[in-house]
């Protein structure tokens, strides 16, 4: 499987700390995460081919899902923040523009400190000097991987034995994306790499006169509030998610969020209880695929690949083990549809490589 990544994903976005559980702690979405996964891939050349080359698709595909105001804020925030005397660790909001706070009118935010409350919804999306460039690169690397998947899909016949081996491509990127909404960042996410990729696949297929359908499968432990928000009113892509019912981001992800307008019925949330095990997770995934993904008849699957479902993840509460991940990959393989995997969460550095690798090796039919 081709793996698209870059050392820039390690070097360019390195906040010194975050506020979690009321305390200052190290930044869990750390550069070491990429190194751990890339290290595993390099040790398994029989399964993975790493490429550090990627193309720049410009701002166009990003603007299809993100508002211009967010991009401008991300690009300029750090310099303004420093001029205003902000801490060099990076930009964090002091207040958030909560709908109850702004109940009686709209005071326009002028300073960077104030505008951060317009564009950032929590305390984990620290904006450093190069955060925007890092997020930009992650999006471009993901698009390059997506283009490669589209090329492989052209030659793929969904029949006979080849149905058991659909093409797959993996974007090993950070910062992650699925919490980033059209005009807000949060949850370690700034630009929604997977949403940008899904929209690009749809747009390119329409341009080519052969419209295709995309199904999002979000298997990160947390609900992908950003991806849901972006596609809530459309029927393509389909958004599906398995996630913790009681955890971050707390206010999204219930089963009754089903989409609206044309999108009604095309947003599928399956919240799972804390302490979900391997078998329970795989059963829920198989059911979700059988009842929602397969009937949708997608031409592509795009997976928000989080392994913070892991039993020893420091910030999550499921019990999925290293042995469970190949089974998850195997279930996705059996859909028989070309699949893009985009890296999201997963914070147990010691097992990150083998767990992510396990899903992809399961998809390749090499482990299950
Ligand atoms: Zn997560």
Image: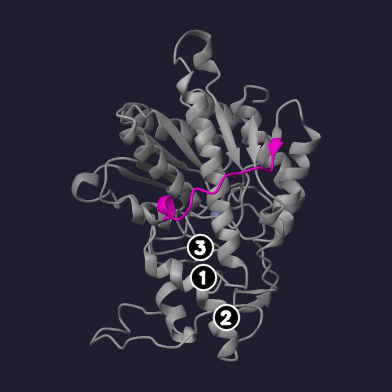
Q: Is residue 78 above or below residue 273?
A: below
- Disc number at residue 75? 1
Asked whether, in this view, residue 130 is left or right of residue 121, the answer is right
Q: Is mark 1 within 8 Å of ligand 1?
A: no
Q: Residue 357 at what x, y percent from top left?
A: 68, 37
Question: Could one spot residue 348 in this view of the protein?
Answer: no
Judge from the rendering whether residue 57 lies leftward or rightward of residue 213; answer left or right.
right
**Residue drawn at x 43%, y 54% as measured from the top left:** 62
Q: Residue furthest left?
A: 261
Nearest the camera: 189 or 307?
A: 189
Mark 2 / mark 3, whichever is N-terminal: 2
Which element is circle 2 on? helix
Q: Which residues are magenta?
A: 50-62
SS class of the residue under badge 1?
Answer: helix
Residue denoted by label 2: 79
Q: Secondary structure at mark 3?
A: loop
Q: Which residue is mark 3?
A: 190
């Amino acid at each position: 499987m081709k793996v698209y990544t870059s050392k820039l994903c390690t070097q360019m976005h390195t906040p010194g700390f975050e506020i979690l559980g009321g305390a200052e702690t190290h930044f869990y979405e750390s550069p070491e995460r990429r190194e751990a996964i890339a290290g595993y891939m390099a040790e398994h050349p029989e399964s993975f081919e790493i490429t550090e080359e990627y193309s720049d698709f410009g701002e166009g595909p990003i603007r299809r899902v993100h508002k211009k105001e967010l991009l401008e804020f991300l690009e300029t925030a750090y310099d303004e923040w420093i001029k205003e005397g902000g801490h060099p660790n990076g930009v964090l909001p002091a207040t958030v523009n909560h709908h109850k706070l702004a109940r009686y009118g709209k005071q326009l935010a002028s300073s960077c400190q104030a505008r951060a409350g317009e564009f950032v919804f929590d305390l984990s999306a620290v904006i450093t000097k190069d955060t925007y460039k890092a997020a930009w690169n992650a999006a471009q690397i993901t698009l390059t991987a997506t283009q490669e998947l589209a090329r492989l899909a052209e030659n793929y016949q969904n029949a006979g034995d080849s149905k058991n081996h659909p093409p797959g491509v993996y974007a090993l990127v950070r910062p992650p994306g699925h919490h980033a909404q059209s005009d807000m960042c949060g949850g370690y996410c700034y630009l929604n790499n997977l949403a940008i990729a899904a929209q690009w696949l749809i747009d390119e297929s329409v341009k080519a006169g052969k419209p295709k359908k995309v199904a999002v499968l979000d298997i990160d432990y947390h609900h992908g509030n950003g991806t849901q928000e972006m596609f809530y009113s459309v029927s393509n892509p389909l958004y599906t998610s398995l996630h913790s019912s009681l955890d971050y981001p707390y206010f999204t992800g219930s089963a009754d969020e089903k989409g609206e307008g044309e999108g009604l019925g095309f947003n599928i949330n399956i919240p799972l209880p804390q302490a979900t095990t391997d078998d329970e997770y795989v059963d829920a995934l198989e059911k979700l695929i059988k009842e929602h993904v397969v009937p949708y008849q997608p031409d592509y699957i795009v997976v928000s690949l989080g392994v913070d479902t892991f039993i020893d993840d420091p910030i999550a509460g499921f019990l999925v083990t290293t042995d469970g991940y190949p089974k998850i990959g195997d279930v996705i393989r059996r859909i028989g549809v070309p699949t893009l995997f985009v890296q999201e969460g997963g914070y147990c550095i010691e097992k990150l490589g083998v767990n992510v690798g396990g899903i992809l090796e399961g998809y390749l039919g090499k482990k299950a």
